[in-house]
Image (cartoon, rainbow, N blue to C red):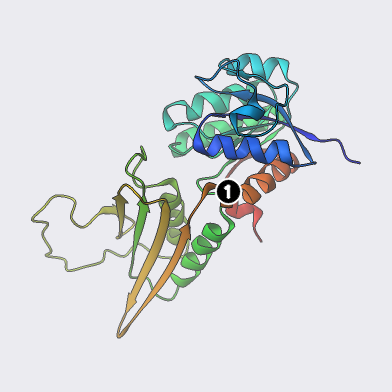
Amino acid sequence: MAEKLKVIVVGAGGRMGREVVKLVLQDEELELAAAVNRSRAGEDAGRLVGLEPCSVLVTDQLEDALRDSNADVMVDFTTPQYAYEHTSLAISYGVRPVMGTTGFTPEQIQDLDKQCQDKGIGGLIAPNFSIGAILMMKFAAQAAKYMPNLEIIEYHGDQKLDAPSGTAIKTAEMIAENREELRQGNPNEEETIEGARGGYYNGFRIHSVRLPGVFAQQEVIFGDFGQTLKIRHDSYERAGYMPGVKIGVQKVMEYTGMIYGFDHFID
């Protein structure tokens, strides 16, 4: 039997982090090397997520976990303000980062790629781990070749910190690769309420909806003479991201450099 991959989960007490801890504890190919959370230190990670005790106690010291656990991979679902710091720290210890946290700038991604290359390890920054969402992005990028007039609408709960979402930004970037910049709408249009037309990206608009009761949805709407096309993905629970997280944990072992986007792992 192949040796298990040892995984550190950062943000283990968060909503996504708890799902990742469950995944690792219940998967025969993975082993929980450490669980890190700024609160809940000292709790058994198994009990934290409603499972049997696992003898891994939650720590609030990420650097100690990276230094002492002999981990292969770090999975991080925390907040944008810590994303770069955590990723860089993991790389410095030779632990491959798999980042579900968003908020990286292009310059930071480029810098982290160099850090990975210098260390000879792989890393992954994935705005979305849902296989369905990745397919939505790929289909939208393909459709943009033939229907270049489009807008993106993304929906999340009202506690999400960043807007637009990382998924929307990644979708826009993929679309822009297949579409020349085309400024849409009436050239003389005027917003009577600031922001009514959404954020501008490469000639099209991105709209961010933030409401309680909403989980995560995104649609890309294409318009042409006499027709529209809508490509939409809906997520209903966090467990739906876990198959993608496992693929990311396994695939990142095969790469050198920082990979931006889970789409690179889906042929």
Say if 175 sits above or below 224 in the image: above
**Residue at image mark 1:** 239
Q: Is residue 138 visible?
A: yes
Seen in the image, is 233 located left or right of residue 66? left
Residue farthest along the bottom direction in this orientation: 226
The residue type indicated by label 1 comes to Ala
For residue 96, which quarter of the picture?
top right
In the rendered image, residue 163, in percent from the top left (x then y), is placed at 33, 44
Seen in the image, is 40 located left or right of residue 103? right
In the rendered image, residue 32, in percent from the top left (x then y), is placed at 71, 30
Question: Residue at the location (42% across, 59% down)?
Answer: 176
The quarter of the rendered structure image containing the C terminus is bottom right
Nearer to me, 60 or 247: 60
Q: Is residue 123 visible?
A: no
Residue farthest along the right direction in this orientation: 1
The quarter of the rendered structure image containing the N terminus is top right
For residue 92, which quarter of the picture?
top right
In the rendered image, residue 216, in percent from the top left (x then y), is placed at 43, 52
Nearer to me, 254 or 228: 228
Which secondary structure, mark 1? Answer: helix
Seen in the image, is 157 located left or right of residue 58? left
Say if 85 sits above or below 236 in the image: above
Question: Residue at the location (50% across, 63% down)?
Answer: 136
In the rendered image, residue 109, in percent from the top left (x then y), is placed at 51, 36
